[in-house]
Image (cartoon, rainbow, N blue to C red):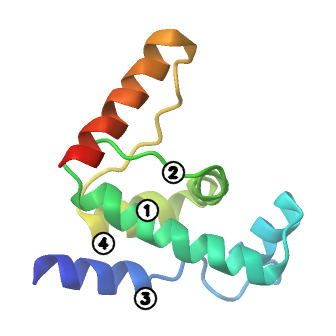
């Protein structure tokens, strides 16, 4: 029941205030040379990623497209930290960049194996 409420809150969460002439969706579209429709789909997937990251006991990694939405949302600091993380999720969801290299690739592969076997 708690997870259902969390999803409902994430799904209805408005990233920007809706009053800007350049909305979050339009900005995501412009900065990535995507159509508005495609950006809307990426934002929907970003919401699913946020939900998964919030409920998962394992580390989750976004697709490149979702990562672009996440990067942009991080720039909307009030929306991201105060509303999404503090009010909706109740936890700080940090974006940690990859350290790169062979060890990091192996760690990622190991996490994929763990997810696929559970």
Q: Which labelled disc corresponds to residue 90?
A: none
Residue 70, by quadrant, is: bottom right
Q: Are marks 2 and 1 in contact (CB under 8 Å)?
A: yes
Nearer-the-camera pick, 89 or 40? 40
Q: Are marks 1 and 3 in contact (CB under 8 Å)?
A: no
Gap in angstroms between the C-alphas marked 4 and 3: 10 Å
Camera-nearest label, 2 or 3:
2
Camera-nearest label, 1 or 3:
1
Gap in angstroms between the C-alphas marked 1 and 3: 15 Å
Q: Are marks 1 and 4 in contact (CB under 8 Å)?
A: no
Q: Residues within 10 Å of mark 4 (few under 14, many from 20)?
A: some
Q: Position of residue 115 (x, y in %)?
A: 27, 46
Circle 1: element type: helix
Camera-nearest label, 1 or 4:
1
Residue ID at (22%, 45%): 117
Relative to 61, 38 lies left or right: right
Q: Which residue is mark 2?
A: 62
Q: Earlier in the sequence, mark 1 or mark 3?
A: 3
Q: Would residue 53 be seen by someone viewing this image from the given angle?
A: yes
Q: Earlier in the sequence, mark 4 or mark 2?
A: 2
Q: Which residue is mark 1?
A: 49
Q: Which residue is mark 3?
A: 12
Q: Which residue is mark 4?
A: 88
Nearer-the-camera pick, 27 or 68? 68
Q: Earlier in the sequence, mark 2 or mark 3?
A: 3
Circle 3: element type: helix
Q: Earlier in the sequence, mark 1 or mark 4?
A: 1
């Amino acid at each position: 029941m708690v997870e259902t409420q969390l999803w409902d809150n994430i799904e209805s969460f408005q990233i920007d205030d809706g009053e800007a002439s350049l909305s979050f969706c339009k900005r995501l579209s412009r900065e990535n040379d995507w159509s508005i429709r495609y950006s809307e789909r990426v934002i929907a997937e970003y919401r699913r990623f946020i939900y998964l990251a919030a409920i998962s006991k394992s580390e989750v990694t976004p697709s490149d497209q979702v990562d672009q939405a996440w990067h942009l949302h991080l720039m909307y600091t009030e929306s991201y930290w105060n509303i999404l993380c503090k009010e909706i999720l109740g936890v700080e969801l940090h974006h940690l960049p990859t350290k790169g290299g062979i060890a990091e690739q192996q760690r990622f592969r190991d996490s994929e194996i763990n997810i696929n076997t559970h």
